[in-house]
Image (cartoon, helix red, strand yellow):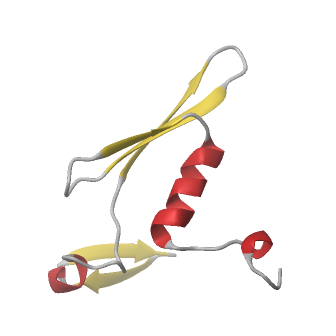
Amino acid sequence: MVACYRGGVSDTIGVDVIKGSESYHSFLLRLWRTGTDGTWKASLLDPVTGQRAGFSSVTALFRFLRERLNVTTDAERPDG
């Protein structure tokens, strides 16, 4: 079982929901600033596969997450 906390409420997710599911993703997120302009960089590590992805901006990180989670923004929707 995995405990999830949302707004002070605890839910429990069964391991069977997590394994092989596109409904659950877990990443270790690292953020840091670089240079004199303080640009944020990021990396994500998938603890299951060990795959690591690096991002040169927060915008690139969000783009990756939207694609990975198959999420569209209002601007990307045909009627938006």
Residue at 33%, 62% (x, y): give it: 26
Q: Position of residue 22 (x, y in %)?
A: 34, 78
Residue at 61%, 38% (x, y): give it: 57
Relative to the observer, which residue lies in front, 8 or 56? 56
For this orientation, the residue located farthest to the right is: 80
In the image, is 34 to the left or to the right of 42?
right
Q: Is residue 37 above or below residue 79?
A: above
Q: Position of residue 3 (x, y in %)?
A: 27, 75
In the image, is 40 to the left or to the right of 28?
right
Residue at 59%, 46% (x, y): give it: 60
Q: Position of residue 73 (x, y in %)?
A: 70, 71
Residue at 46%, 65% (x, y): give it: 68
State how many labels appear: 0
Q: Quadrant of residue 56?
A: top right
For this orientation, the residue located farthest to the top is: 36
Relative to the observer, which residue lies in front, 1 or 29? 29
Q: Is residue 51 above or below residue 64?
A: above
Q: Position of residue 27 (x, y in %)?
A: 35, 55
